[in-house]
Image (cartoon, helix red, strand yellow):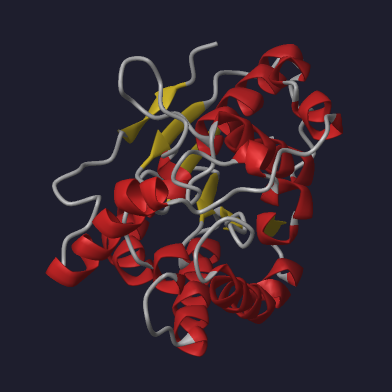
Amino acid sequence: MFSSYVAIGDSFTEGVGDEQPDGTVRGWADFVAVGLAQHAASTGGGPVTYANLAIRGRKLVPIIDEQLQPALDLRPEVISFNGGGNDILRPRMDVELIAGRFRGAIERIRAEGIHALMLSGANPLDHLPLGSAFDRRGRDLTTALRDLAELPGVTFVDNFSDVGLRDIRYWSADRLHLNALGHARVASNVLTEVGVPVPVEWGVEEVAAAPSGPKSRNTAAYYREFVLPWIGRRLTGRSSGDGRAAKRAVLEPVQL
């Protein structure tokens, strides 16, 4: 199994929504790294190293231009790649263009002999204003990329089609980012796809078996706290990731 892992992407991969007491974020990629390390330890393997270059707010092209080559330069055994979520949220989106750039990134990873772990993001359809439009774009992009899963050296984790993950229990207060439970479920999807046991202490199966949460309501307070600031950043050309650096820029051993 993989002993070195680099994650690239946007807020989904950085871990936004899974905030820790010290102000840092954790997220599914951190969970995956821990899962790989625990599996290695239990099977007599060596240490697992992990880096996370993802930065919130990045659209697909900046992810590729800014993060892909540094990830390749680290020479890991596996790179997880997710992007396009912020493109889906823009007024216009060219699905064919985004899919083409996505394909090119996967091919670059494969050309270096590195395993490509390709993820779709979770679907916020049930909770966001104009959710149906985002759902349609997300499905179109996922469909356009699904055939990449048939390529050697590629694993596709389709979180967008995980209907259970749409439950409000898995989403943070802004309803755009997953919370800790949601990130743990994504990590369990990833580990399952690569054949690594999901740590039972995460409680993923227990949470999934519990009753669904109540349907969310988009109140005036929600629009004031989350929607209007997001619109303001779009109108002024700002991003939530401006001035931010990768949270884990080099491969370091995963601490258990």
Please tell me which residue lies in front, 202 or 132.
132
Residue that sits furthest to the front in the current view = 220
Q: Is residue 226 above or below residue 138?
A: above
Q: Is residue 25 left or right of residue 168?
A: left
Quadrant housing residue 233: bottom left
Which x, y percent locates residue 230? 29, 58
The residue located at (20%, 62%) in the rendering is 232
Please tell me which residue lies in front, 201 or 226.
226
Q: Is residue 183 left or right of residue 176?
A: right
Q: Is residue 108 above or below residue 162?
A: below
The residue located at (64%, 58%) in the rendering is 126
Please tell me which residue lies in front, 210 or 143.
210
The quarter of the image holding the C terminus is top right
Q: Is residue 95 above or below residue 31?
A: below
Which x, y percent locates residue 177? 48, 46
* Count of numbered labels shown in the rendering: 0
Please tell me which residue lies in front, 33 or 135.
135
The residue located at (53%, 76%) in the rendering is 103
Q: Is residue 181 above or below residue 233?
A: above
Which x, y percent locates residue 41? 67, 14
Q: Is residue 165 left or right of residue 16?
A: right
Quadrant housing residue 92: bottom left
Which x, y percent locates residue 146? 70, 73
Residue 71 showing in the rendered view: no
The quarter of the image holding the N terminus is top right
The residue located at (45%, 37%) in the rendering is 17
Q: Is residue 194 left or right of residue 63?
A: right
Residue 5 showing in the rendered view: yes
Residue that sits furthest to the right in the current view = 209
